Image: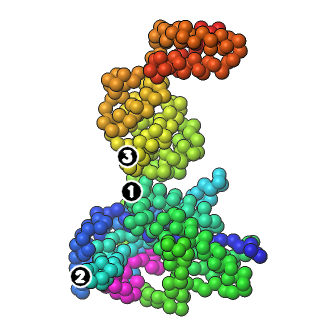
């Protein structure tokens, strides 16, 4: 590279809202289903029908706007975005154009320990289009499935504030986590309910004049987003260094080849001929309603992670793991409440939840579910550990049983004989037996081979079938050996 280039990225996210019915009719929004079974005259775009706005869509937009620090507009307007495509039978998409429901706001990120804020331009509401299905019919012909037509979307547009690929990924992850915490979106990239387009350009390092951008589409995973931007940086820097000019265009990412290719240039770009939707009155959001929605906002991931670090002395890493999704954060909070201990107990709960319990869920393909384990039961396991009743392998076995079958940890420990033996006389008996059985090792230990203590502890544990309390065994052996 003969010259240093600065990457500039702006992201447009389309998030499907988790309403039960579509934005302008009563059809269900459920993913999948036989093609064209979740449709009616309104979402099919039949002539003479009237759309009726779903109130929950507006509420979710307000909720999202408030969580992201946007200004909620008391009046916003739906507009027709006109274009022809087979998956859009009306010939226009109902969206918002000049007067969106939310403006401003931003997403706060921490990247390599540095705090950053990516500003938002706007958030608006719109309807999704249908889907073209190619080669699905018996004769190999294409079809159109309109089940998705009219599913409500939020389009969240960022300013071109992003300066690295890591920042772009972090922005999307943070935004996705916030939407999921708010309960407005399921965050599913593969099924396309959370999708993103990236506006990518380069400018000379130190410049403040943005270069010509290309819009990248079709990246349905964080990995593909990374690959697409990487490819685009190489492509654009080669053009610029060869003295050429980047052409403003839309480019489609091809996951098979790991590259982007031109879809349409600015010259052939659509002129959407937006105009206000005559069938829908302006959307009015009274200030009192905004305040009501504000009061119902949950504690968001960053605030939660900060609280875990401040009040429970957890590391930034642990706090991040625990706030990656709402289920985990709520399970953690409920467990800490049930245990009622201080920061030490919270740390133990965090370790079990992000370690052993996460492993069990992963093995069972249970995602963020904890099987039949309840917060109360996890708190019980920690209580038994702190009382010295449970240790090492016993903890694992109890958690496994609670995950599969549920139940009370104390009962599981008793019925499966998993309690640790801390009783001094039982431990003493086992130690004496080992000292008698290994006189040679005892002599060598006394002569200075201190690492033999580990061997002797191991033998005692073996004699106690792994149930000896390691702390008690260690102390007892040391005392008997005069160490
Ligand atoms: Zn419908």
Looking at the image, how many numbered discs can be counted on the residues? 3
Distance Cα–Cα, label 2 vs label 3: 48 Å
Residue 223: x, y in percent? Answer: 53, 64
Mark 1 secondary-structure assignment: loop
Residue 440 drawn above or below residue 120: above
Kindly identify which residue carries mark 2.
49
Q: Earlier in the sequence, mark 1 or mark 2?
A: 2
Distance Cα–Cα, label 1 vs label 3: 25 Å
Do the numbered discs 1 and 2 sit on residues whose CB atoms are within 8 Å?
Answer: no
Query: 148 or 359: nearer the eye?
Result: 359
In the rendering, which numbered label is found on residue 183? Answer: 1
Left or right: residue 55 compared with residue 161: left
Segment colored magenta: 81-101
Kindly identify which residue carries mark 3.
364
Q: Residue at x 57, y 12 (%)?
A: 438
| Label 1 environment density (alpha carbons within 10 Å; few <14, some 14–19, many ≥20) | some
């Amino acid at each position: 590279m003969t010259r240093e280039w600065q990457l500039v990225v702006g992201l447009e996210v389309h998030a499907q809202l988790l309403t039960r019915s579509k934005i302008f009719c009563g059809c269900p929004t459920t993913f999948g289903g036989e093609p064209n079974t979740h449709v009616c005259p309104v979402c099919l775009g039949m002539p003479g029908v009237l759309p009726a706005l779903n109130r929950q869509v507006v509420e979710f937009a307000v909720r999202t706007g408030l969580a992201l620090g946007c200004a909620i507009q008391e009046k916003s307007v739906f507009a027709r975005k006109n274009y022809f495509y087979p998956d859009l039978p009306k010939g226009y998409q109902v969206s918002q154009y000049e007067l969106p429901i939310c403006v401003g706001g931003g997403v706060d990120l921490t990247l390599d320990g540095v705090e950053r804020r990516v500003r938002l331009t706007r958030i608006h509401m719109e309807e999704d289009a249908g889907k073209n299905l190619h080669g699905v019919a018996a004769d190999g012909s294409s079809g159109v499935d309109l089940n998705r037509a009219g599913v409500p979307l939020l389009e969240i547009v960022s300013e071109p504030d992003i300066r690295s690929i890591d920042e772009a990924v972090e922005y999307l992850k943070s935004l996705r986590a916030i939407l999921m915490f708010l309960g407005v979106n399921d965050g599913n990239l593969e099924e396309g309910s959370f999708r993103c387009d990236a506006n990518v350009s380069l400018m000379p390092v130190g410049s403040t004049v943005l270069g010509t951008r290309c819009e990248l589409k079709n990246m349905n995973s964080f990995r593909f987003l990374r690959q697409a931007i990487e490819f685009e940086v190489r492509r654009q820097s080669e053009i610029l260094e060869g003295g050429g000019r980047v052409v403003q265009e839309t480019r489609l990412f091809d996951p098979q080849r790991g590259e982007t290719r031109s879809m349409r240039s600015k010259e052939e770009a659509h002129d959407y001929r937006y105009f206000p939707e005559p069938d829908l009155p302006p959307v009015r959001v009274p200030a009192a309603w905004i305040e009501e929605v504000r009061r119902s906002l949950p504690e968001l991931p960053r605030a939660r992670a900060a609280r875990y670090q401040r009040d429970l002395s957890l590391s930034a890493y642990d706090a991040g793991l625990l706030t990656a999704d709402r289920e985990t954060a709520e399970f953690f909070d409920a467990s800490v409440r049930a245990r009622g201990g201080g920061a030490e107990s919270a740390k133990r709960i965090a370790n079990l939840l992000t370690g052993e319990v996460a492993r069990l869920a992963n093995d069972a393909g249970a995602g963020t579910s904890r099987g039949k384990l309840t917060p109360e039961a996890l708190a019980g396991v920690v209580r038994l550990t702190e009382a010295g009743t449970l240790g090492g392998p016993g903890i694992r076995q109890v958690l496994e049983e609670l995950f599969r079958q549920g139940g009370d940890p104390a009962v599981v420990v008793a019925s499966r004989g998993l309690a640790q033996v801390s009783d001094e006389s039982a431990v003493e008996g086992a130690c004496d037996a080992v000292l008698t059985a290994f006189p040679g090792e005892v002599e060598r230990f006394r002569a200075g081979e201190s690492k033999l203590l580990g061997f002797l502890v191991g033998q005692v544990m073996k004699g106690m079938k792994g149930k000896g309390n390691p702390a008690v065994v260690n102390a007892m052996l040391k005392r008997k050996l005069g160490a």
